[in-house]
Amino acid sequence: MFKKFSQIGRAMMLPIAILPAAGLLLGFGGALTNPSTLAAYPFLDIGWLQVILSIMSFAGSAVFANLALIFTIGVAVGLANGDKGTAGLAGGVGYVVFVATISGFLQLFSAEGASIDTGVVGSIVVGSTVAFLHNRYRKIELPQFLGFFGGSRFIPIAASFAAIILGAFFYLIWPPIQGALTSAGTAIAAMGSFGTFLYGFLLRLTGAVGLHHTIYPLFWYSSLGGTEVVAGQTISGAQNIFFAQLADPNHTGLYTYGTRFFAGRFATMMFGLPAASLAMYHSIPKQNRQKNAGLYFSSALTSFLTGITEPLEYMFLFVAPWLYVVHAFLDGVSFFVADLLSIRIGNTFSGGFIDFFLFGPLQGNAKTNWIWVIPIGIVWALIYYFVFRFLITKFKVMVPGMDESESDANVPVAASGKASTLNDEAQIIIQALGNEANIESVTACATRLRVSVKDGSIVDKNSIKNLGATAVFEVQGGIQAVFGGKADLLSQEINQILGTED
């Protein structure tokens, strides 16, 4: 079960990776064409510049308006074992037929104005179904007179018929589920700031094993994150609502309350975790600081700028899981405080400075209350620094560099400055995994190399760590290695060497 959830979460990282670029377009375009902005900064009101910015806004909006379709294609591609292009096409066709089927049933049998929005759940179901059909039947042989439709060409056809069945099924079962989701979202809203704390705390805990990718989309893209009318359209999902409001030139006042599912991230990722990194650095013996400085400060900078926190978190997660729980609790409290102060900053991917600047200061304090992030962040940095410094020192937590007998050989390659080619590193990883015979599949998410192996006991974790992995740990059916942004490059290189790249 864990492996299936992990695969779906990994597959969803492909479409999620599109969002920062779309957010940049919409963030700059929407902010700099807003009448309030033009009134404050008249020098921006130049014809050709406004045309460019408007097109940027339209382009970014198009991505967020078609997220369900994009997610379906991404899931189909991510779960396909081969010939991923055909899987993506079949996923797109399947989703279009799925939506059309539901629309047809609504027109024929439902009251006027009735609607069904399956959101990310429908995307996952359709994409997973298409991937299943693709993996099972992409090499099917049909009778000779139907031979042209055999093999991969069979998949879009089969996906279309499957989508009709799924559409009919969802027409019957989704209205009560949609009502239940709305009720659940209402219940969380009724819990107020405590519900926001629980969301932040549990999201951080599940992030330890990579299952957060299957949780937050339900709040970002379904009615669990709220439902609001924006520019005459009913929008569901916290992020969908936020970007619809961002694209609406007539929006006034604070952005959607659903931003509470984002706003708590900024104090933790921009201030708290970098301070924790400094605390870990100051806690290790002085003779080990120089050779570990690159590891700590690059991880802190990554967290601050992009909100990618795994390289830093995995320095202490496995040596002191209880410390990670402390971190998750503090992150939950950050969400709680942001909710209390009505901080309304959205995000595309994570809670780093890039998203903070785009969707905080650039949008204006009247819509976001972004100014509160600065004092709260400073307080959070102090709390994280002193809590981590005290706990690591008192309990001798073995963060990188803590071992006084540590030799240069044990320092990760990326931290020590020793260089090797990507191909060399991929070859070493293949050997450490037990060679090709032991490897079933190799993929990557934003920061982790994810490998399914036949026998996990023969995997040489130390060899992988020495290549710069912050952590290497076992999951059911395989291992995960945290390489940061390099993970996807390594995945592609390994698959190319193994001849499994499509």
Image: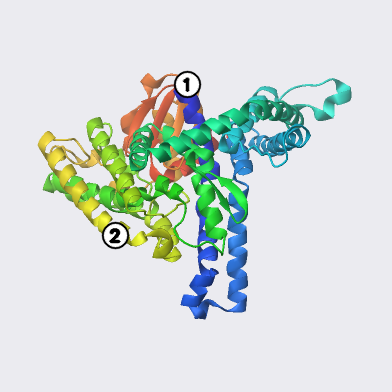
Disc number for residue 216: none
Image check: 323 left or right of 64? left
Q: Which residue is located at x 16 percent, y 39 percent?
A: 402
Q: Can residue 436 be spotted in the picture?
A: no
The outermost residue toward the left is 394
Nearest to viewer (mark 2 / mark 1)? 2
The outermost residue toward the front is 111
Image check: 467 left or right of 165? left
Vertical placement of residue 49 versus 343, above or below:
below
Find residue 349 and report its horizontal and vertical position in percent. Answer: 46, 48
Image check: 463 left or right of 189? left
Kind of residue at disc 2: Ile
SS under mark 1: loop
Kind of residue at disc 1: Met
Q: Which coloring applies here?
A: rainbow
Q: Which residue is located at x 40 percent, y 32 percent?
A: 480
> Which residue is at the front of the view, 124 or 202?
202
Q: Can residue 122 be spotted in the picture?
A: yes
Q: Which residue is mark 1?
A: 1
Q: Which residue is mark 2?
A: 374
Vertical placement of residue 203 versus 368, above or below:
above
Which of marks 1 and 2 precedes in the sequence?
1
Q: Quadrant of residue 156?
A: top right
Find residue 21 and report its horizontal and vertical position in percent. Answer: 53, 55
